[in-house]
Image (spheres, helix red, strand yellow):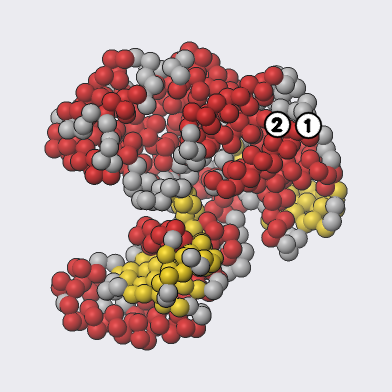
Amino acid sequence: MARRLAAILAADVVGYSRLMGADEEGTLERLKAHRRELIDPKITEHRGRIVKTTGDGILIEFPSVLDAVRCAVEVQRAMIDRNAGEATDRRIEFRVGINLGDIIIDGDDILGDGVNVAARLEGFAEPGTVCISRAVFDQVRNRLPYGFEDLGDQQFKNIAELTHVFRVKPADAPVQQPGPTLAEMDLPVPKKPSIAIMPFTNLSGDPDKNYLSDGLRLGIQVALVHASGLFLIAPSAVAKYRNAGVSPDQVGREMGVRYVLEGAVQWSGRNVRINVELTDVETRHVIWAERYDRTLDDGFAVQDEITAEILKALGVKLAAGEDLGHRDLDSNLELVDRFYRGLSHFYAGTKDDNANARQIFEAVARLQPHSSIGPAYVCATYLLDVFRGWTESKDETLKQAARWAAKTLEIKTLSNGMAHIVLGFDDLLNRRHDAALANCAKAVELRPNCPIALSFFANILHFCGRPKEAITKIHEAIRVAPLYPPWFMIVLAAAYRDSGELEKSISAAKRAIQLNPIDRDARLILCSDHGFAGRPHEAQTLAQEVVAADSKFSVARYADSQPYKDAATLKRVIDSLREAGLPG
């Protein structure tokens, strides 16, 4: 069959059945007018081709993602004015999803995963908004005058891989924080010096060089994550500020930190110019700024200098035994380029980026056999494959992660917390509970600002029968990463449930479902919550939802996947699920 890469736009009318039920002829007439006067002319203007229409939906192919996004935004803007005079219950609103992907050509029709993802994005979008995939975002983020709201990874029905979703925010619309506010999390502002590092601006004019500015910024972040005297916001939480044009004051308020680091990087051949600026958002003064003119060969050296100056400006001293995590790498052009490219892929958070990061860090390990950095990141990529479901054999991939983790610890030049995270998770799955606790406690000691270390430690504490301590640690992870993944809420919900705080568990489980509407584990926790709270009808409804989504679900298999140290706690949870009507 013929295939090609295309930008696919899927749109539908919100509440179409309700509108038709209330006024069939009037709804059809208004929809035809919108098509005739606005939508079809915009599609033609932006070179789109209508593939097919349904009563409430439309599928369009565009030769360019720029055309697709422009068309969608202009239509949604115009619909605000066209709906201004209509009663609320008569307004026609659209939701739009756009994807860039491989499609199959079948006559005038198009098929394939590229189309399916666009349809899922459309269903995920709020009324009047446009949601795009990561593939679209990467193509348009520096080329259109819009903001983009990072909604994180989403698991869509019948789509094997997670889809990283962004919401388009036109230039005249405010960029909103998709996660909970600090007030909603009820977490105190850190007493220790606190900082967020903004995405560095690439001034080279070449988008292919983004990995160098990202790598430098992430290299500084990776170094500072080891400093126990500092509070550091995770890079995932500040990703939404890229090209958003926000001030340090706004970042400081939204992230709950006192200091914000900004940077701009310009590359020319092997030469690099780096401008950095550290702002105290409380006084609104720049407390340190510097310009560095170096060569790429000196990348690690200038990274060390910037890191040291940040610590000096904030009055932070490293504790005994703390290191900055990469000092055993040789500073040369090939190593710096590979390391920064690998970091950029690793923190991008997609399946393909993770695979690319693994190849790069395997090369780093070969080039620098005396360094633990390459093996540490290789083991981390395998762990991410396991946790995100990006592998056909979870057991084999976890074995690879553990093998590279052991190799990391064999190299004595640096203590690396990443390896302890991997080994701790492997210990937990194999019911070596004491070893799991020891490994993850060591990981947190070595990486006190790392949300991965904190959240894995919380998970292990929960399964080891220490749910109250788990609640404390997962809150620390959430505070470091305010835009957290859904599974943070699953850990929190399970820990609240097992500590007897059922209403808080219900709230956390519902938040997990809000972040990922098809999450099964959150529904199972919520099901047991309602059972323990004496609400059998609610528990049975959730049980039915689980079976409807997975007809092969078995309580026994689910029990095997829950590595509780205390058999009585596990039995109590499993009994509640069976009482709700779940099979097996």
Image vertical order of residue 276 relative to residue 117, above or below: above
For the C terminus, the quadrant is top left
Residue 310, percent across and down? Answer: 71, 38
* Residue 71 visible here: yes
Image vertical order of residue 129 relative to residue 393, above or below: below
Image vertical order of residue 123 relative to residue 470, above or below: below
Q: Residue at (51%, 80%) from the top-left corner?
A: 47
Q: Tell me if label 1 and label 2 are in contact, CB under 8 Å.
A: yes
Q: Amino acid at mark 1?
A: Gln
User: Farthest residue in the front direction?
Assistant: 1
> For mark 1, what is the residue?
368
Few, some or many residues within 10 Å of mark 2 (<14, 14–19, 20+): many
511 vs 397, left or right, is left
215 vs 581, left or right, is right
Q: Earlier in the sequence, mark 1 or mark 2?
A: 1
Question: Dot 2 lies on which element?
Answer: helix
Disc sitting over residue 373 in the figure: 2
Image vertical order of residue 495 relative to residue 553, above or below: above
